Image (cartoon, helix red, strand yellow):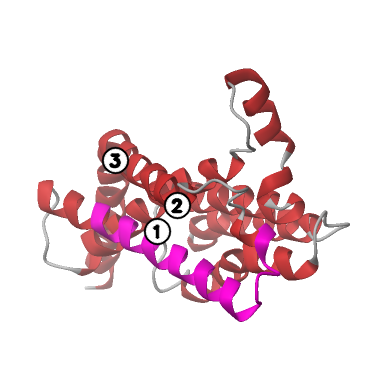
Amino acid sequence: MALNKYIFPISTFIIMAICLAISAIDVKDTYTTWALESFPVWITLIVLPLTMKRFRLTNLVYILILIHAMILVLGAHYSYTDVPLGFWIRDHIGGKRNNYDKIGHFMQGLGPAMYAREIIARCSPLKRGIWLGLFCWCFAMTVSALYEIFEMLISLILHGTASAFLGDQGYIWDTQTDMIMCLFGAVVALLTLSRLHDHQLDKITNEKEEHFNTMV
C-alpha cells in the first residue's frame, strides 16, 4: 500500500529524466545554452526524489512539474528561438519572432503559483482564500523577476555569448512581455486549478489523520 503511494511521483521522475536525456542529444545550439536552459530540471530531479517520502506532493503538482520540465527541455534542445512549435504558432497566428519562450514564461507563472500554494497551504497557518492566492501570485512574479535578473547576469558574465539563452530576438519589450505571460499564467492557475488542488490537499490531510489513528 505504501509503495502504491509513490508510484505516481516516481513515474513522473522517470519520464522527466528520459526527456532530459533525449534533449541532450544533438542539441541545436551549444551545450552551454542547453545546460543553462535545462538546469531547473536537474535541480528538480535531485530535490524531489530526496524529499518525496517526507513531503509527498499532490498528483496535480507532480503533473504540473512534469509539464513544466518538458517545456524547458524542449526549449533547451532547440534553444528557445528555434523550437518548431514556436514557428508553427508564428505561421498560424502571425508575428515576426518565435514565441515559444512565451509558453515557457506562461508556465513559469502557472507552475510556481501552484507549487507555492502547495507548500504554503500545508506548512503555514495561512488559510485558503484570497490572501493565499495573492501570496502565491506574488511568489510567481518574484520567480519571474529573479529569472530575468539571472538572464542579465549570465549575459554579463559570458559577455554576450549567451544570446540564445536570452532569446530576446531583438525584441525590446522581451523582458516585460515575459513577465506579463508569467502574470497570466499565475492568474489562470489560481482561478482554474485551486478547487481541484484543494480536493487533493484534503485527501492528503485525511490520509495523514487515518495513519495517525492507526498508530494510536
Q: Is residue 143 magenta?
A: yes
- Tell me what residue is drawn at x 75 percent, y 50 percent: 78
Alpha-carbon neighbours of circle 1 within 10 Å: few (<14), some, or many (≥20)? many
Q: CA distance from mark 2 to mark 1?
A: 7 Å
Residue 90 is situated, as x and y percent measured from the top left of the image, at 63, 27
Alpha-carbon neighbours of circle 3 within 10 Å: few (<14), some, or many (≥20)? many
Mark 3 touches mark 1? (CB < 8 Å): no
Q: Does label 2 or label 3 sit earlier along the sequence? A: 2
Image depth: mark 2 or mark 1 in front: 1
Task: Judge from the rendering whether residue 12 lies leftward or rightward of residue 164; answer left or right.
Answer: left
> Mark 2 sits on what residue?
108
Of residues 109 and 53, the one drawn nearer to the viewer in this rendering: 109
User: What element does badge 3 sit on?
Assistant: helix
Q: Does label 3 or label 1 sit earlier along the sequence? A: 1
Mark 2 touches mark 1? (CB < 8 Å): yes
Alpha-carbon neighbours of circle 2 within 10 Å: few (<14), some, or many (≥20)? many
Part of the protein shown in magenta: 137-164
User: What element does badge 2 sit on?
Assistant: helix
Task: Judge from the rendering whether residue 147 lies leftward or rightward of residue 42; answer left or right.
Answer: left
Q: Which image quarter holds the C terminus? A: bottom left
- Tell me what residue is drawn at x 45 percent, y 43 percent: 106
Of residues 77 and 89, the one drawn nearer to the viewer in this rendering: 89
Q: CA distance from mark 3 to mark 1?
A: 14 Å
Residue 207 is situated, as x and y percent measured from the top left of the image, at 30, 56
Of residues 174 and 112, the one drawn nearer to the viewer in this rendering: 174
Q: CA distance from mark 2 to mark 3?
A: 12 Å
